[in-house]
Amino acid sequence: MIIPCIDLQGGRAVQLVRGRKRALAVGDVLGLLEEFHGYPILHVIDLDAAMRKGSNAQWIKKLCASAKMKVRVGGGIRTVAHAAKILSWGAEKIIVGSAAFKNGKVNRGFLAALAKRVGRKRVIVAIDTDDGRIVVRGWREKLKLRPQEVMPSLEPFCSEFLSTFVDNEGTMKGTDLSWFRKLRKSTKLSITAAGGIRSMREVNLLERAGMNAAVGMAIYTGKLKTKRSR
């Protein structure tokens, strides 16, 4: 299954290369809902909140209220109260990344409190990696941890994982299918793969391996051709 992504920065939907260089920007954020009509799930990520440079809360509220698909929201969710607030806006699930780790380890206290408050079924943990190691703080800080080491210990606190292969994010070079196949063996929970996915071949191979595909750049540039219901 393809999951389209809206990454928000300064009130625009943007696509960044490896989380740094902006490659494109779309001003009509709500207009993307029509473009993505027919997809069952939408990912919305607040990049400004993730990098502590502001908030796109007003746009997230509008997207959650207007979307006719399930909306999953991430970016800068650091407290249980904030997570609960986003869910109250109509989000189906929240995505936590940096807050899932503290001092280089799994932040069990926060995750346990979050799961207790909103329910683990409404929590997705983002495990983004660069050169095989987990990165946090807007992909600026690299931990010593590798995803395969921590996924089993994260399972009690979430319903699924979002894993971005940062090495290829936004590059349109394709993703690393063999790496994701290895990752698939580390958990029984659902995994959504992201990072460089550019073709239906990759989407189909990921699906065959039991994973969804979160896609941004390939959809925005028209490189990924899909059949969507209208």
Image (cartoon, grey):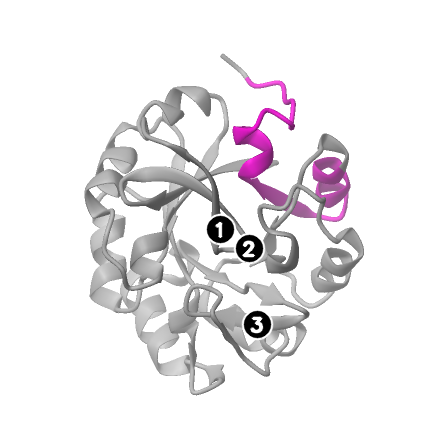
Tell me the crowding category of disc 3: few under 14, some 14 to 19, or many 20 or more residues within 10 angstroms, Cα based.
many
Which of 196/213 is in front?
A: 196
Specify the quadrant of the image occupied by residue 221. top right
Q: Residue 21: horizontal and vertical position, in percent?
A: 49, 51
- Give the structural element (helix, strand or loop) at label 3: strand
- Give the structural element (helix, strand or loop) at label 2: loop
**Are the residues tagged 1 and 2 within 8 Å (C-beta)?**
yes
**Marks 1 and 3, Cα distance to the nearest angstrom?**
20 Å
Task: Provide the residue designation for mark 1.
Answer: 21
Q: Identify the amino acid type marked 1.
A: Lys
Task: Provide the residue designation for mark 3.
Answer: 134
128 vs 149: above or below? above
**Are the residues tagged 1 and 3 within 8 Å (C-beta)?**
no
123 vs 105: above or below? above
Q: Residue at x 33, y 46 (%)?
A: 9
Task: Provide the residue designation for mark 2.
Answer: 18
- Give the structural element (helix, strand or loop) at label 1: strand
Specify the quadrant of the image occupied by residue 54. bottom left
Which of 180/157 is in front?
A: 180
Give, as a single range, the part of the protein colored magenta.
Answer: 202-228
